[in-house]
Image: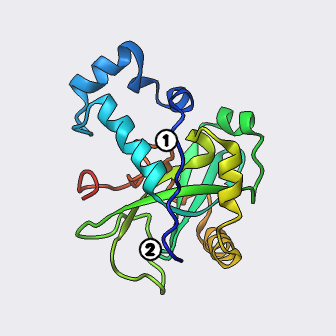
Amino acid sequence: MTYNPGGFALSRERVRAIHPELFGWRRVFYSRNSLDCPESADGELGVIADGLRDGATQPAIVVSAEPFVIAVYSDELDAVVFLRFAIELGRELRVAPRRRMVACNTYGTYPEPPCDVQLGPWWPGRFNNVRPYIADLIATSRTAVEAKIETIPEALWQRAWELAACWYGPTTPKRDGRPRASWQCAYCFPYGGPT
């Protein structure tokens, strides 16, 4: 797929609902005591905003409403990763399996791919991990998200669903889908942050 940047604006209000630690009094504690991310709360919000604006647009498909799980495809990996979210969020959005969403993916490379990434036969070899941002959950404009869904070729939607159906199950590793954690494998991530 040709690079198709998300181009979305970040909704601070929507991010606050899923990352309250980046706002208000918690923000000071996060900035001074964050051992897993050296950036301040403002820096982390900037990283999320950049990913939503500049990340590569890719298919994201709801595979389960309860628990709320989204499969995100990456043509850079020819793979899917599974993101889990709070059940309450899924209920609020009235999600159903096979609902199409948009991911804005950024990438990193590690000595080995994380244990939840099964690189596919069309993997180009540039990267081996993905940090997805689900635009439907944190972008300001629902209209822009729906328009972007239409720009993703049907073949990518089919590949995303094919891989999701193949790999998804009760024991499948699922990442924390919230933006500041979506790059980390749920079971094993020994290398720190993306490079």
Amino acid type, residue under disc 1 in the picture: Arg
Mark 1, other Cα within 10 Å: few <14 / some 14–19 / many ≥20: many
Frontmost residue, 22 versus 82 = 22
SS type, badge 2: loop
C-alpha distance separating marks 1 and 2: 21 Å
The N terminus, quarter of image: bottom right
SS type, badge 1: loop
Q: Which residue is under mark 2?
A: 76
> Where does the image place residue 100, in percent across and percent down from the top left?
71, 58
- Residue 96, label in figure: none
188 in relation to 58, above or below: above
User: Which residue is pictured at 37% across the width and 12% down the height?
Assistant: 25
Q: In the image, is 19 to the left or to the right of 114?
A: right
Quarter-of-image position of residue 60: bottom right
> Where does the image place residue 190, in percent across and percent down from the top left?
25, 55
User: Which residue is pictured at 54% across the width and 62% down the height?
Assistant: 57
Upstream in sequence: badge 1 or badge 2 = 2
Amino acid type, residue under disc 2 in the picture: Glu
User: Which residue is pictured at 74% across the width and 36% down the height?
Assistant: 91
Q: In the image, is 26 to the left or to the right of 170?
A: left
> Where does the image place residue 153, in percent across and percent down from the top left?
66, 74
Frontmost residue, 12 versus 187 = 12
Q: Quick one: which residue is furthest to the top in this view? A: 25
The C terminus, quarter of image: bottom left
Q: Quick one: which residue is furthest to the bottom in this view? A: 121
Q: Which residue is under mark 1?
A: 178
23 in relation to 184, above or below: above
Kindly tell me whether residue 136 is visible in this rendering: yes
> Where does the image place residue 26, in percent across and percent down from the top left?
37, 17
Kindly tell me whether residue 62 is visible in this rendering: no
Q: In the image, is 172 to the left or to the right of 152?
A: left
